[in-house]
Amino acid sequence: MKISYSWLKEFLKIDLEVEKVGNLLTDLGLEVEGIETFETVKGSLKGVVVGEVLSCVQHPNADRLKIANVDLGNGDPVQIVCGAPNVAVGQKVPVATIGTKLYAEDGESFTIKKGKIRGESSFGMICAEDELGLGNSHEGILVLATDVENGTPAEKLFDIRTDHIFEIGLTPNRADAMSHLGVARDLNAGLLQQEKIKKKLITPPISNFHIDERTYKIKVEVANNKLVPRYAGIVITDLKVTESPKWLLEKLRSIGLKPINNIVDITNYILHGLGQPLHAFDADMISGKKVVVKNLPQGTKFTTLDGVERELHEDDIMICDGENNPMCIAGVFGGEKSGVTENTKTIFLESAYFNAVSIRKTAKRHALNTDASFRFERGTDPEAVVFALKRAALLISEIADGTVVSDIIDIYPNKIEDFQVHLSYERVHKLIGEEIPTETIKNILASLDIKINNQTRSGLGLTIPSYRVDVTREADIVEEILRVYGYNNVVIPQKLITSINNVKGISKDKIENIAANFLIGKGFYETMANSLTKPEYVATSETLNEERNVNMLNALSTDLSVMRQSMLFGGLESISYNINRKNNNLKFFEFGSTYHKYKKEYQEPKHLSILVSGNILRSNWNVITQPLDYFYLKGMITTLLDRLGINKLRAKALEGDIFSEGIRLQTGKLKLAEFGYVSKKILKTFGIKQEVLYADIYWDNVLKKAGKTVVKVTDLPKYPEVKRDLALLLDNSVKFIDLYNKAFQAERRLLKEVDLFDVYIGNKLPAGKKSYALSFVLQDEDKTLNEKQIDNIMEKLQNTFIKDFDAELR
């Protein structure tokens, strides 16, 4: 938000250094992010002086150019080539000397240099008024009065003013400070408390407001007083819609606004000066001389001022005429046909207080962010509605020769009462951490227009002004006191008093930090994906259920309309983004939650996701390229769980279509992690062609077991285990879990482990086939296995695979 220092001084007569004011505003909570200098004429005509044309002859090589000899007052006339048709001997003219910076209409600067034009030297530029930024005319050079002394700097001849503009990063709760008056109120309180400077806040006078004649009647009807608690308006006629006076143009331009015409400019002036948005309707375009504030049916078409046809929502507040034709989206944007034009003679000037939530939703629905909606959706002052209307009417009468021809229509059936809050001195001291004198507290509250209704030894009964919509609780009052008292004035104690919390068990945050530091030490990068995601992602996997989506009621976009059911898709977006930028070796991890809707409840379990793709190390002449594979990820997960004290794990083959091949790790019946190769179908959705491995660690379950594992000591096996491998050629439809289950069905007593350690799919195999390499661990706890037993078991397994899966031994 831009605040003009000179405009601020109209509300508060001060003469402090700009930097000091900026620092004080920041201390008050209105953070000044920057201070810019504004000039009514950009560059302030530095380097432009008055020159007298001593001679003027035709350019020998150009019909439309002349060569002028110009006296700049330094006794050394200069030659300037000029293309203006009106240059003549004896004229006093503005001359931009060599090195002067002039500014084009778009703000781009260009420097005057010595040069040759059609073979003739030129040592400057005789300027037209648009080239100097003094007007729009380019018909010829600007001719000055003849009594001006040669060499006089041009900045002394014209009323050029400079101003300082504060760029304030306003927090959303400070609706009261979204105007020059609001900032002045805060500044006045800060000056009194922190600088001991007492000033009177000056509000614009409205005592001269009067009704010129009552000859124009317009009826106003408000259908829903909850959405529109207060609505006021007045009719002004005999208008002359022209360009605004210079002072008003400069005010608006200083804060980055583009002037339109005197009527619209006055409404913008009131908005930025007093914080109350206004809207002017061409009264001749209001059918039936009636204004109706209501909701229209869903799907009603309406064309706004920007020429865009919009489809209205049934909850949008609309300003309509007597024939129910929409004229304006209330508090947001005007209509194409009802706005003020140069032909407008009579206006209906609106000032209102709208429901903030309704305006915010409407603005969001239509993707409109206007100065009016910015204020209405945060909360304006219901008591400023008529004051701002009267002030605007006075300015319109003065600037546009308007005549007020109706009474003020003010529909305000249920007055909005000011908040009543009780403040405890003890609470103030406790929250601030310092005992502030009660008289100081009272003075601060008075400077903030907070009325003291009653007082006791322990506290105060307070009434909050209507414009402070963010102050509703005792804690809010304490915050107000503190920011005016000054955060920097709170004494920092020399002693640090702390206590040690008695926390049972291991802190969840500590466990998370252990895991994060472990992964970072292994070369992983922590990512943070958006919890909002695309609803289409659910359809990529049968394990996800669309009915369990947690949908956003007021989504920012269709791409961010549901809460994620899986951490996978946000991670794959990051993988795809990096691969598309030639960063192919990736190791990511993320802590986050997934969101699920069930019939009776919502669930929000926490997960740790890990994604790896590419090679372990970047390719180099002395590094053997080693891919990030299944064994790398498995080793990383088991080592991490072991680091957290979880070491008794059981592996099971994983079913589902998220993984082409996957494993589940669990302890007892508690799932800890699922990991494997992401299916090519899902990778294709993200345009990823290289293999990606993904691990989904159920963090809530990990926390249940972390640091709680009971270490049991048993004797080492007396008899050795035996490991054998089988390489099988299988149909693509066969999954590892099927082989896993069949193996244990074939041999229940001596078979201890089954693992998949290699998968091959390629053009060297028959179509529709793949190769699995399986390892089997055999052990008898009572004796050593002999070769015959081992061979019998392996033959039994082999025959089972051949019979049930049509497998071939490779």
Image (cartoon, rainbow, N blue to C red):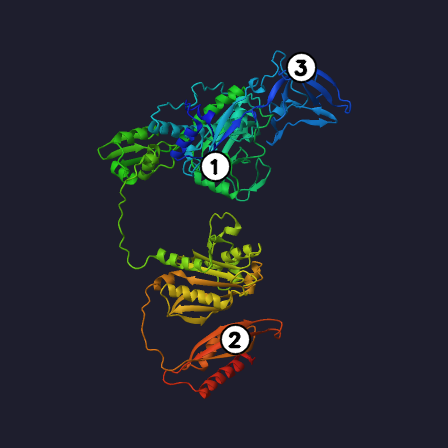
Q: Does residue 647 appear to the left or right of 363 in the view shown?
A: left
- Residue 671 seen in this snapshot: yes
Instruction: Read off the residue under disc 2.
Output: 773
Disc nearer the start of the sequence (2/1): 1
- Residue pointed to by mark 1: 374
Q: Type of residue at label 3?
A: Gln
Front-lying residue, 436 or 525: 525
The quarter of the displayed image where residue 131 is located = top right
Asked where in the image residue 642 lies, by quadrant, the reply is: bottom left
Sequence-first tag of 3 and 1:
3
Q: How many marks?
A: 3
The local secondary structure at tag 3 comes to loop
Which of the two residues, 223 or 54, is positioned nearer the viewer here?
54
Which sits earlier in the primary sequence, circle 2 or circle 3? 3
Direction bottom: furthest residue: 788
Q: Position of residue 784 (x, y in %)?
A: 40, 85
